[in-house]
Amino acid sequence: MAANTPQKKDFRVIIVGGSVAGLTLALSFERLGIDYVVLEAHRQIDPQVGASIGIFSNGARILDQLGVYDNILEYVDPPTWNEMLTDQGRLVQRSDSLRLMHACTGYPVAFLERRQALQVLYSHVQNKNRVLTGKKVVAVDQDKGGVTAICEDGSSFTGDILAGADGVHSRIRQEMWQHAEATNGLKRLATDKKAMSADYRCLFGISSPIPGLEEKTIYRTFNKNWSFLVVIGKDGQCFWFVFEKLDSTYRPPNMPRYKESHHADFIAPFLGRYVSQTVTFEALWKRKKVATLTPLEESHHSHWTYDRIVCLGDSIHKMTPNIGQGGNWAIESAAALSNTIQDLVKQTDGQPTLDQVRKALYAYQEGRKPRTKDVCEMAGFATRLEAFENPMHRIMSLYVVPYAGDMLVDVHCQSVSGAPQLNFLPQPERSMVEGTVFQTSQYAGDGDGFAWRALRALPLLLVCASAYHAGRLPSGGYHGRGESEAAILIDIGNLVALQIIGMAEMVRRGNSFSWAAAWPVFVTMGQWKGPLAYMMPAYFFLHYVQIIPGRYGAPYNRHVPVHYAKTLLPAVVVSSVLMTALSLFGGQEPNDDSWTWQPLVAVLLHRVLASCLPDTTEVDRIDNHGRDKKYLYLAYGFGGVFSAALYFSAGWTPISATTCVSDCLQVWKGLQGQGQPEEKCWQVIGFHQLALMGSGLFWQFLHFRDLRRIGRLKTNLLVVMGAVLGMTLAFGPAADPTSAEASAIATLKAGRPGDSINHTDWGNLMQDPIVVSIETKAQGGDAVKGTWQMATWQACQWRSLRDLDPSP
């Protein structure tokens, strides 16, 4: 393992606690060449207390950097299946979410005994004489020159920084508070000292293999005020947890303490309860190797450091074990502290002053607190959710989570994507596999928060408001100048093209629980209120604000289930034919309200048709997430060609856009009492077409801006938008969004950020003879030939987009 140039030996860190956090910190310092000593209170580094540890991707990546992870895997048979059950053993959900988590992060979920993890970490320490056992720290002295740890046996150790990794009952945290109180150095310290509480207790342990419990499976049983968690590890070994709500909330110094003699009374009510569909907890208890009963402390302290003392791991952020992040967060904090100390030593040449130490450790604290607060709250919520602490938790556990698809995987991936790593060591190959959350974490950058995106997209709402104030089309039809047929063709062209985009976005996996899933509401409201320009800008606004580039970073989030992709185009076409037939043969005017309900009919028909095909999503989302592409490109191509054909049939030319601008101005004059009533109808039509075109162009601009910001698009935005504008002028407002949508998805699927669409690709595309010919014929008014050649060019475009994507 490569290491940086050793730092000066006179800078030293005292690590109190040979825990996972403490040993990770020690290994990091060895890679940096920073002097350290580890003081462990126990006589052995790996005591057996029945504890297990789950290594998730955020911790695994750091251990991988340290060269430790492969040895961790020797003790692991990663679980694949996750089963959720009721107390009667009824299966609520069985999913392969853990396999998907592996695909999304590059690392499997690894469960092993805590002492095994400690053994692996300790075995990689090169200077084992620096790891001292039987050294219980009882006092700490510090001054401007350094900090000294005084042990129970009378020995003492002096250094520049003292790191407390000594667990939830941390002596170092207590010493830090005492030093701060003596100098009145920390604000609101009294509140911080009351931060720890316990609402639950847990009996955890390890049992030998149990018949009926499948390998590679995690079992979770939920019920009122209690829950089970059972993880089947390597060779069938069972790691289990029994959670129970306490009779009240406890705080130090009144935390309950338990002995082995309390186990029998605690476990009696649980023996007959099911941990799987066929196995009760009694089977686990009979084969237990070791068990421990403890209150589940929860805390997220405000003060992590004072002067030369700093805390990490459970000593400063203690969470419940339901989401398995306690150990991983300790590893994260060790990495973050290592990065901080590396920078401190480098900037001060190994001789930092007290003020420099304070500033560095404060920066570490403030950098870790927001993220740690979130995960502590998430862990506490999971504990209460699984114990049905209130009726809403029960509803969510039994009726929401089982039907939320891979929502929990999404939440996990979003959480670990921001994890720190060791800045001074190379990134492991596992973490940089294409599509993993660490490889795509660069998609979310500064200025990409909700507020900034909303501010950036605000013009879309202004367009929506303008369309509303421009007025509706008059009741009773269109008037004069052949507006009836032309307006109907334009509306149908807009609707079909946008319907294809909206319905695809509605079922795209990355858009679950987003506004994109509410597409039918927006388009139906737009149809009911009049032109689509009433609602489409609002849809574009919400879609952009909520659908960030990182949401599509993972390939499985870009995936549209194939049974939906295959039936998208047939659903739109058949519903359109039905609405047209109803209008023509229903004895009503062509411009009646039949098409108002086309979006809902299309969505319902899409569901019906998709249900007739096999759902291969479970396999495709991991192993074949590119199967949807050819069906989507076909649908996008049809939408673009169909919309443009109707625009040409309605007499659209590039000059029409300038006419729309003129009509737009006339509409505003009409609102001020200056327009002629007989001209108002066509002017309103023109205004709404301009609003739809403008909002669509701006929506595309925002998404192409995102692609450029994350490095997936190298072409200058002005060149891209010039091409888009040219296509809009040539083929109408709704023809181009389908092309842009296909382009954006193809660009995201093009591979790593370096594998992007560049200006040469765009330049070649816009200089294509077919495009030039189309422009010439369209401007000359040859609608039939122009439409035919445009269809040929669209086919060429889909081919070029497909070639950008290396996946099968």
Image: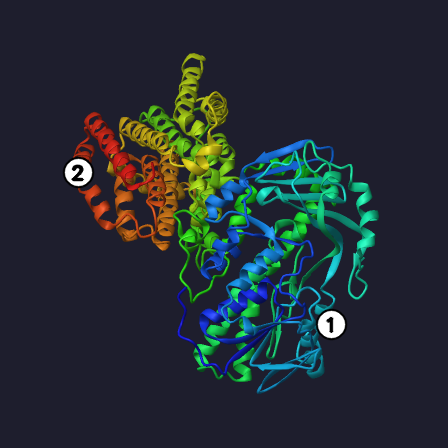
- Disc 1 marks a residue whose amino acid type is Ala
Q: Is residue 800 above or below residue 310?
A: above
Quadrant housing the C terminus: top left
Q: Can see residue 35?
A: yes
Which SS class for mark 2?
helix
Local secondary structure at mark 1: helix
Whole-percent x, y for residue 290 in the image: 71, 51
Depth check, front residue: 149 or 200 = 149
Q: Amino acid at mark 2?
A: Val
Residue depicted at 52% across the width and 54% down the height? 72
Count of labels in the image: 2
Determine crowd level at label 2: few under 14, some 14-19, many 20+ residues with C-alpha closer than 10 A: few
Q: Nearer the viewer, mark 1 or mark 2?
A: 1
Query: Where's residue 634, x and y in %?
Result: 33, 29
Residue placed most toward the observer, 71 or 394: 71
| Residue that label 1 marks | 190
Quadrant of the frame with the N terminus: bottom left
| CA–CA distance in space, label 1 to label 2 | 75 Å
Q: Residue at x 74, y 50 (%)?
A: 203
Figure quadrant of residue 182: bottom right
Residue depicted at 34% across the width and 46% down the height: 751
On screen, residue 298 above or below 627: below
Residue 100 vertical position relative to residue 261 in the rendered view, above or below: above
Q: Which residue is mark 2?
A: 772
> How far from the left and from the top, in percent, is residue 561?
45, 32
